[in-house]
Amino acid sequence: MRSASAALALFFAATILLFSLSAPRFASASTVENLMSGFSFVAILAMGQAFPILVRGIDLSIGAIVGLVGMIVFDLSLILHVPGYLILPLALFAGALAGALNGVLVVHLRLQPFIATLATLAAYRGLTYAISGRQLVPGLTTTPIRDPWLTGIETYFDVGRWLGLSRLVNMPWVPLSFVIMLAVFAVLQVLLTSTRFGRDIYATGGNHEAARLAGIRVNGVIITAYALAGLCAAIAALIMVARFTTATEALGAGMELTAIAAAVIGGVSLAGGVGAMFGPALGAFLLGAILIGLTLQGVPQFVQQIITGAILLAAVGYDRLLSVRRQRRLSAPSTAAT
Amino acid sequence: MTTGGPPLLRGTGLAKIYGNLVALDDTDFSVDPGEVRALIGSNGAGKSTLIKILTGAVMPTRGSVEISGEIAPLGDPSEMIRRGVACIYQHSNLAPAMSALDNIYLGRQPTRRFGFVDTRRQRLKAEELLAHHGIDIDLDARVGTLPTVKQKEVEILKALALDARVILMDEPTGWLAGADVVRLHDTIRMLKARGVGIVYISHVLDEIFAVCDTVTIMRDGRVVAESAVAEIDRPRLVHLMVGEKLARESADAALHQRRPRGTGAVRLSARGLGKSGVFADVSFDLHAGEIFCLTGLIGSRRTELVRTLFGSDRFDSGMLEIDGRRVAPRTPLDGMSLGIGFVPEDRHREGLMLDMNVTENLAMATLGRHCRGPFLSRSGMVRAGRKAIEDLSVQPRDGSKVVRLLSGGNQQKVLVGKWLSRSPRILILDEPTVGVDVGAKAEIYAILRREREQGAAILIVSSDLEEVMTVADRIGVMVSGRLAAVHDAGTAAMADIVREIGGGSA
């Protein structure tokens, strides 16, 4: 697993180097700033997505959860005038709840994760339209959210000046969303590698029956994994609402695919039980660097999408190869003769 | 051995019924502290079901389980583990991508506050355990990268780490080589001295005489006998396992129906077949009009071997001849065009379309025959199906029944019938009667004998010695990917075969 992370980091460095040499203005402070502000929430989504994948599931609904949470924030703030310090925990709770519902469907109705979350994708997006403050109170469509607790998320720190480096080089400003991403990373990584719950996640994804027979409450573990994906989606939604100072019904649409791509590129195996937080986070920034680089090179949008698809295919194919190899190892016979 | 107190683990009146199949029928079972109790019986006798009930993996239909005299909740693995009942399962129960250390403490890592795993304590405890039992394992290695023997040791450590009071072992030596078996037995004796109760399931009678105190013999979902190992001998044990009636029948069958070796033409001839890392140097002939049974332990690579004959896998060395022509089937379609029919082991996963009806399943291998141009002829299928249902006496006699709703025995008849409809010259069956009740077994054997009389060459993979002794004309024994011996069924002694299966010298 460690060597996979190293390989990914190396690939990331090579990508940066390649674009720095080939794309105009890529090697600049503004690119780094764009990357941090534009892909921190993608990284958070990818880390959240990693949990359902680790327990051998998938969550297609996280983009819809982003939209739903965004609209809840919009309604609470602009229509109900709820103060921001209350909206933050409510938004996080709503996201976690929406995620947990996915888990309940998977565990208790025994639905395929793909089908269950495809259904909730549609349902959550529909719910977003149903509660849309833009439809209920059309006058509010152009009113920005001004609550400092919410807009405060869109803050930049001039880290370069604090460190006294600005006089030497042009340093990027660090967005708060990047700091949040680091915090989410730290918490989830510790949760995954150093707690009982983390081991239970790996055990459930690695061998569901063995985990059950070892007395692990696999149902609870799976529901929690989906709830964490929902929670991460809520955090991403808050960051996006703060940036746009509003929410639309389409907020987060299609984002589940980017998150899944980043997670798989980051070495989270679709066969379950393999992966950590570093990979998905770096995977998101790798995708970001490629998209920014291609844009600076003047590559059209649709070609960028084809390239993203090709990268995803390559990552999934590689993952498949690895898990087939693992399986073969496990079932290899004892070579010792009697 | 007995302490006078209540038994460590006692099951009373346990029963498990799946649909029409009674897997376990009002069974009593107990283990005392420091007792090693063997649990034996042929496949489908109900051993695994009993074990699964005792570990909480399966909820019994009736009955109760007591641990040290206290009633235990049923169908809950974590409660059984908490009460000190551990199990080493036949199939791997490890998470391949996790380290050996994490697997040993799967689901019960020592923790500090807030659920943080106390990795230092976990490692110390594991190292203590390793030292105490003289087992050498790289704790940080990912389990998926360890050799099979080491994986088994990780499973054993997993049970030991639990401080289990009762350890159930379901064919623990199935994957182990001779020296490792001896080491496992030493471990068992050490545990016994510490007052741990052990239930030991094995087909290898030598092991039972080597390490067990008492023996419980099961047949057809019931306990048929219990005895101290010292008071029973091998022929008596085999007799009890197989059943008086079947033992007599198979003896009769041997006299009247068996054919001497090599009466028919050689249909299939394997010379030095091998697949690297799986099996090696397998040579045998399969004649027209005979039933050749391949027996051996689970994991002795019989399934892997026959899959290469059919073409669903490929061998990579040696030579295969069918009807005197050298062939190398690369796909199942190749196998079929060579006249081979293949009934796979797992009928649910590999054999049947469970949600399609009997007629459709029967026609699955012969669809080409029921086509008019690009269209399927429904009436042709139904006519062929009706005849097959009659020939095989599938119950109920209704081709429109969905296969999922049939009993295991009837499902198996449909699966066999699917291939018989092609009139195969060579028929390969992998564990044809697993999970099939006694009556349906007899019917399937009758079908196979009829095919043999009509000149088919039949190759059966079976772990069920009773079955092997009943239907085989010749018996091959596979051990760890090699064909260790071939016998004429009429003259082979069960005891010899049992010893060879376990890897003993012939």
Image (cartoon, coloured by chain):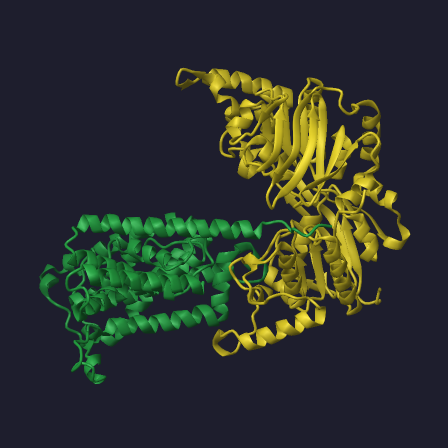
Chain colours: A green, B yellow
What residue sits 77% from the left and 67% below the top?
A: B190
Is A323 located above or below residue B478 in the figure?
A: below
Is any part of residue A228 visible from this angle? no
What residue sits 41% from the left and 58% below the top?
A: A268
Quadrant in which the N terminus of chain B appears: bottom right
Q: Is residue B131 left or right of residue A130?
A: right
What residue sits 42% from the left and 55% below the top?
A: A269
Residue A98: name its quadrant: bottom left
Q: Residue furthest right?
A: B231
Residue B19: name its quadrant: top right
Q: Position of residue A182 (x, y in %)?
A: 32, 72
Q: Is residue A84 left or right of residue B455?
A: left
Nearest the eye: B329 or B96: B329
Is any part of residue B382 visible from this angle? yes
Q: Is residue B85 left or right of residue A75?
A: right
Nearest the eye: A255 or A235: A255
What residue sits 68% from the left and 17% below the top?
A: B454
Q: Position of residue B113 (x, y in %)?
A: 50, 79
Nearest the eye: A309 or B399: A309
Is A12 located above or below residue B60 in the figure?
A: below
Is A146 located above or below residue B505 in the figure?
A: below
Quadrant in which the C terminus of chain B appears: top right
Residue B42: name its quadrant: top right
Q: Position of residue A297 (x, y in %)?
A: 16, 56
Q: Is residue B385 left or right of residue B296?
A: left
